[in-house]
Amino acid sequence: MKWFLIKKGFFIIFVLLFFPVVSFAQNGYEKRVEKYQNQWAKLIPTHAKIQYAGGMGLISLGAGWDYGKNNQWETDVFLGFLPKYSTKESKITFTLKQNFIPWNKKIGTKGFSINPLACGLYVNTIFNGDFWVSEPDKYPSGYYSFSTKMRFNIYVGQRITYRIPEEKRFFAKSVTAFYELSTNDLYMVSAFTNSYLKPDDYLRLSFGLKFQLF
């Protein structure tokens, strides 16, 4: 009887100690899983884009992320297609783009809004061996002062957005149409050093659509 009471006492103590530890460990595990899931969820693009022209290719398809207190910042990545034109083969371009959209103003009650200003920077490159970042040895030092493979760009533009009613949504919450007026590092230097150039020689106009997914 005495040993039975002792064993029973040990069992009760074990249960009282073990289950809180297991419960705490389980809660800790669930919190870690939730934390990692939230971190991975942040990697899912919040929007998709298609853009015509802009020094990124004839047509570029991309995805990106909105963030900031009012989603005023965007980071995009694009793959573009550049037809043959006067070259031997078509090319693929890659672009990394950072956007800033400071203001958003609603228009009426039909779900429309405008962004009076959108601006940003982007860098793009061409996947082709005929273009280079560092000047090849076959050219005299300083013969080319700019890379032919990589361009740094700046732009300003405007946007108009239509927020799709929930019952009519297929895959996007809203659709945004935008235009951008851009130039790059090579064009800017040319504009300052060649007075005979006109704005249409160093400025480019592009158009695009943004589909808000989340």
Image (tube, rainbow, N blue to C red):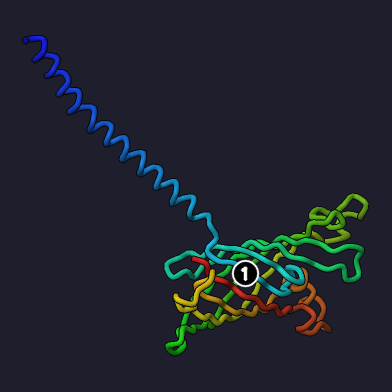
Residue 28 rendering spot, x and y as whole percentages: 33, 39
Q: How many marks?
A: 1
Q: Is residue 178 placed above or below 49 in the rendered structure?
A: below
**Is residue 103 visible to the viewer in this orientation of the structure?**
no
Q: Is residue 61 placed above or below 42 in the rendered structure?
A: below
Give the residue type that dot 1 points to.
Answer: Lys
Residue 121 rendering spot, x and y as whole percentages: 63, 67
Q: Residue at x 31, y 35 (%)?
A: 25
Along the line of sight, which residue is nearer the eye, 99 or 49?
49
Residue 192 rendering spot, x and y as whole percentages: 76, 76
Is 148 positioned to the left or the right of 204 in the image? right
Q: Is residue 2 placed above or below 42 in the rendered structure?
A: above
Residue 210 is drawn in which quadrant? bottom right
| Quarter occupied by the N terminus | top left
Q: Is residue 108 placed above or below 147 in the rendered structure?
A: below
Residue 204 is drawn in which quadrant? bottom right
Residue 107 rendering spot, x and y as whole percentages: 46, 88
**Is residue 37 visible to the viewer in this orientation of the structure?**
yes
Q: Residue at x 82, y 78 (%)?
A: 194
The residue wearing badge 1 is: 49
Is 197 positioned to the left or the right of 44 in the image? right
Mark 1, Cα crowd under 10 Å, few <14 / some 14-19 / many 20+, is: many
Residue 203 is drawn in which quadrant? bottom right
Q: Residue at x 79, y 56 (%)?
A: 127
